[in-house]
Amino acid sequence: MFGAKESLTALSVALGSLAPPPAIDLLGVRGALAALGLLGPALVVLAWRRLQAIDRSMTHRDKEIAVLQQVAMLRVLPVPAIDSLALRVKHADIEEGTDVFRQGDVGDHLYVIADGEADVIRDGRLLRTLKAGDSFREIALLRKTTPTATVRA
């Protein structure tokens, strides 16, 4: 990413040094300053809808990043890595009393509780209660395994 950013910076500097002489010859100094100075705002106006869409998606992703940063095992990751995970987040609203998955089911997802609680139940016994910011099924990220407990919202 750093190499791509540096390449774009070098390209921008090159274009910035090539554009003024012909513009000055064509429009004069004041005209060239006005034309080239209006180029940036004109591009923003043309891209306004896309920029707003990006802004909305970033606001939404900021919430997901905040939830992911609450997870103890993810806290050590740099923000770009968490941002990459936030792109892959799938939301599910689980009603109270509903099983997220059952003991013995096969799964390959990591679950993070954004809001509410979930009970971990093995063989009909409550083992613990998970709260917002807790995660479960971490081992499923490494290999497909069957869970040894049921998790119920």
Image (tube, rainbow, N blue to C red):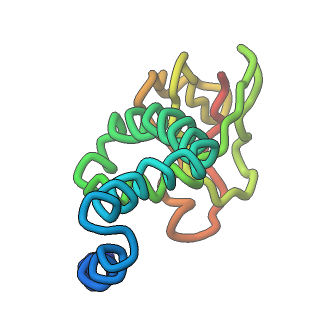
Q: Is residue 70 left or right of residue 90?
A: left
> Looking at the rendering, which quadrant does residue 92 occupy?
top right
Residue 91 x %, y %: 66, 36
For the question of whether residue 31 can be seen, the reply is yes
Q: Is residue 99 above or below residue 19?
A: above
Q: Is residue 152 left or right of residue 129?
A: right
State which quarter of the image contains the N terminus: bottom left
Image label count: 0
In this view, the residue in front, 143 or 16, is 16
The residue positioned 32% from the left and 65% from the top of the image is 32
For the question of whether residue 8 can be seen, the reply is no
Residue 86 x %, y %: 50, 49
Q: Is residue 80 above or below residue 55?
A: below
Q: Is residue 45 above or below residue 115?
A: below
Residue 70 x %, y %: 34, 34
State which quarter of the image contains the C terminus: top right
> Looking at the rendering, which quadrant does residue 80 occupy?
bottom left
The residue positioned 30% from the left and 52% from the top of the image is 79
In this view, the residue in front, 144 or 128, is 144
The residue positioned 46% from the left and 59% from the top of the image is 84
Residue 22 x %, y %: 35, 82
The residue positioned 27% from the left and 58% from the top of the image is 30
Q: Is residue 106 left or right of residue 110?
A: right
